[in-house]
Image (tube, rainbow, N blue to C red):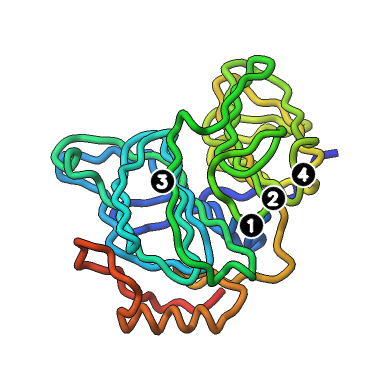
Amino acid sequence: MSNISLIIEERAANIGNFMVGRLLPFREKRAVGPFVFIDHMGPAHLSDHENMDVPPHPHIGLSTLTFLFEGSIMHRDSLGTELEIKPGAVNWMTAGKGIVHSERTPEYLRHSDKMLHGLQIWVALPKELEQMDPNFTHVEADDIPAWEEDGVSYKLIAGEAFGKKSPVPVYSPLYFIEIKSKEAKKINIGKHLFGESGLYILEGSIKNGEHVYDPRQILITTEASLCEFEISENSTVYIFGGQPFPEEHFIFWNFVSSDKELIEKAKTDWTNQTFPKVPGETEFVPLPEPRIK
């Protein structure tokens, strides 16, 4: 019997400068464990006059995880952080009670052709930590736990699994795992997982039972401990999930909280521009109109 309860197709979304493939939230599945938002950026070919420019915008109640396959992004935030992220590294920004950041093409790349490809992920904070002080952590690619087993390459980008722990400082039980294989292999990792689990196919394909699933799909398992599939040659997939929270988390724009009043306060604070500022930045993204979901 198949262990797949839901298949989510990547959906195009416009974030201003270019299109991204939105994977979560989805009308039938608002979260997988503590993961509440996943965007697949690119792959985008940017010419010498095209750049990523996401002006300062706010967040509350979550941690953002940026993981690039290609390209580079300059991160600046209201804590005073100014740091370039490159492929394989992790930017982990915890908003807590409020943070503002911008994401732009680094200056040295702004007048040359370039690529941008990666994942941007939001992880909700537990209710008791939603109002914690904001912080930022950068983890280099070489510090991410990586190993090989039966010809299959694994990386534990965040969280705990396989008896290993990523240096990314998460705030609830979760995992975010990369699996790459050059050959067709059977993968059985359910004993290492817990809670809710999703699988995103970046390239190649997987087979579950008699069904074959291709890139740009998320498969949601019915039972994480039964996670078993066949991965085709030259494939890359990502497994993400963890323990779901007992209370519902609401999303409005970049604000995530179990308390709608905190979201309303954040909306007012951003409209009044009382959030902390990003040093050296004067632009900002205005508050949109959609209601809380």
Q: Residue 41 carries which label?
A: 3
Q: What element carries label 2?
A: strand
Indicate the amino acid at tag 4: Ala
Dot 1 or dot 4, earlier in sequence: 1
CA gap, disc 3 and disc 1: 21 Å
N-terminal-most mark, 3 or 1: 1
Instruction: Measure the C-alpha gap from mark 2 to mark 4.
Output: 9 Å
Q: Identify which amino acid the numbered label 3 is placed on.
A: Met
In terms of secondary structure, where does tag 1 sit? loop
Between tags 1 and 4, which lies in front?
1
Which sits earlier in the primary sequence, circle 2 or circle 1? 1
Question: Which residue is disc 2 drawn over?
Answer: 242
Task: Check if mark 2's residue and mark 1's residue have beta carbons within 8 Å.
Answer: yes
Q: Distance between the residues labelled 2 and 3?
A: 23 Å
Front residue (pair 89, 51) = 89
Q: Which of marks 2 and 3 is nearer the N terminus?
A: 3
Which residue, given by chain and number where applicable, does mark 4 sit on? 224
Pointer 1: what residue?
34
Looking at the rendered structure, the kind of residue marked 1 is: Pro
Q: Position of residue 232 (x, y in %)?
A: 63, 23
Task: Pinpoint residue 77: horizontal percent, then vertical percent.
Answer: 33, 59
Labels 2 and 3 touching (C-beta < 8 A): no
